[in-house]
Image (spheres, coloured by chain):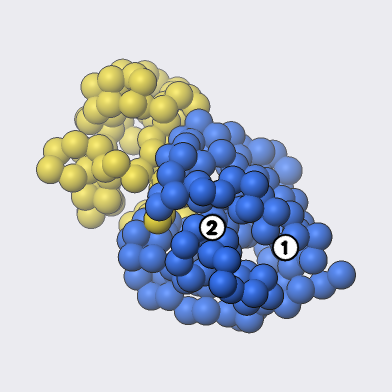
Chain colours: A yellow, B blue
Amino acid sequence: MSIEVRIPTILRPYTKDQKAVTAEGTNLSSVISNLDSQYAGLGERLLENGSLRRFINIYVNDEDVRFLGGLDAQVKDGDSITILPAVAGG
Amino acid sequence: MALEISQKIVDAILEQSRNEYPDECCGAILGPVGSDKPLRLKPMINAAHSPTFYEFDPKDLLALYREADDNDEEILVIYHSHTETEAFPSRTDIAYAGEPGAHYVLVSTRKQIAPATEFRSFRIVDGVVTEEEVSITE
């Protein structure tokens, strides 16, 4: 199971400046665990108290994971995940 | 560091901010990768529809990144308006700033400020705000 994960600029310090990395997993939760085991600290930038952070957007094949079950969103070999920080403020 | 931007784009952003008042307006400006020339204005919908908050809709945000990628462009400027306060990054602006390479432009629609001083540009990196000069071209 190989999933491509696109990393936004702000998180590239965790991935040695790689724009895209590969991860393993069957759902978003396991992909994030796998990412964190490869790139220490990355998981914490995506999760807060075990839930997805409100101002980080994650997409599986262009669909917002909030509409795919969040951390339970299923992924399969060949899927592409994109992480983008929300553009927001006050 | 400075932001070089055309008068036409500045005017369009100020007009958008007035049109969307009392909500904050927002958008981005794209330019060729590596050029630091913001040429293509992309007004965005403020999904928060709020006078004190703005957020690009997550679907629109992804589409914007895809469009930029397809055109060998990048997001060079992220802008939004403050409705009643100065054009300076708020605490939430700083907390959520996720593009260390972008110019963060703020405009204000509060009435007592002259338009010339309402358009300001900043870098926001690791919680540190640095104002930069704005150079307006014809």
The residue drawn where x is 34% and y is 59% is B92
- Please state the horizontal and vertical placement of residue B107, each as a whole percent of the image: 58, 64
- Please state the horizontal and vertical placement of residue B86, each as a whole percent of the image: 48, 70
The residue drawn where x is 33% and y is 26% is A66
In the rendered view, tell whether residue A69 sits above or below residue B14: above
* Residue projecting furthest to the left: A49
Residue type for callout 1: Val
Q: Chain of mark 2?
A: B
The residue drawn where x is 67% and y is 70% is B115
In the rendered view, tell whether residue A69 sits above or below residue A54: above
Contact (Cβ within 8 Å) of mark 2 with mark 1: no
Q: Is residue B135 left or right of residue A82?
A: right
**Quarter-of-image position of residue A12:** bottom left
- Please state the horizontal and vertical placement of residue B49, each as a whole percent of the image: 46, 39
Q: Chain of mark 1?
A: B
The residue drawn where x is 33% and y is 65% is B91
Identify the residue position indicated by label 1 in the image.
B10
